[in-house]
Amino acid sequence: MEVPLAVASAVFLGGYSVRVLGHGHLHQGWLDLCLALTLAAWAFFAFDYAVRVRLSGLGLFRFVRRHLLDTAILLLPLLRPLSVVSVYDRIQHRYDKPRLTLYARVIAYASLTAVLLGYTSALTVYFAEHKAPGATILTFGDAVWWACATLSTVGYGDVTPVTPLGRVTAAGLMACGLALLGAVTGSFSSWLIQVFRREDER
């Protein structure tokens, strides 16, 4: 089931990107088609989520409480690479030893997620900002630069969102940047600590 979900994620990203960047350049029929593909991809995610809720036998509210990550992925399908976190936790509970490939995979997924979050945030902020009065984010390039500075928690402040949607997106991206940075550094530190501990035991 992961392959169809990955394809649906790609369709979601492609449709959303073309609709935002092609606005004013493409015929309205193409834009409507992109919107239909985006909604269809999200409907597929919602169907998958509903099936898993049904099969779990927990009921909706209990399922949401126990699967917060899955719920977040439903709300923002491009977060799907974060699903590796649950797999990582299960493996670590079974094998208490350094696993470089597993840690490297977590770092790779976190990096991919950072790229996807940065790109989609740049799209959202560009769409909300480029025609707003007093805006400093006027091109998609400006939005990408802003996303890189925000996600890395640098925050130069040379370009900033002025619309409510842009500022909400910025707040979410700041939180995600801190979380992803912590995940990467934490995984690497944990691997090093396990290696040193095993060396001391020898």
Image (cartoon, rainbow, N blue to C red):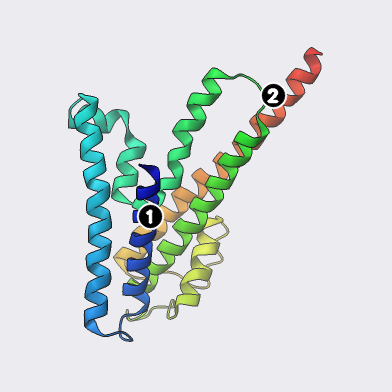
**Quadrant that contains the N terminus:** top left
The answer to which image quadrant residue 167 occupies is: bottom left
**Mark 1 and mark 2 residues within 8 Å of each other at the beta carbon:** no
Badge 2 element: helix
The answer to which image quadrant residue 97 occupies is: top right
Residue 52 x/y as whole percent: 25, 34
Is residue 193 found left or right of 34 in the rendered image? right
Which residue is denoted by mark 1 in the rendering? 7
Residue 22 x/y as whole percent: 34, 80
Crowding near the residue tagged with mark 1, few <14, some 14–19, many ≥20 C-alpha atoms within 10 Å: few
Q: Label 2 sits on what residue type?
A: Gln
Q: Is residue 61 above or below residue 151?
A: above
Residue at 35 percent across and 49 percent down: it is 4
Q: Earlier in the sequence, mark 1 or mark 2?
A: 1
Residue at 41 percent across and 59 percent down: it is 170
**Quadrant that contains the C terminus:** top right
Q: CA distance from mark 1 to mark 2?
A: 37 Å
Q: Label 1 sits on what residue type?
A: Val
Badge 1 element: helix
Q: Is residue 35 visible?
A: yes
Residue at 63 percent across and 40 percent down: it is 104
Number of numbered discs on residues: 2
User: In the depicted view, which residue is nearer to us: 189 or 31?
Assistant: 31
Residue at 37 percent across and 77 percent down: it is 21
Is residue 1 found left or right of 103 in the rendered image? left
Which residue is denoted by mark 2 in the rendering? 194
Q: Is residue 200 above or below residue 19?
A: above
Kindly report which numbered mark, 1 or 2, lies closer to the viewer in this rendering. 1
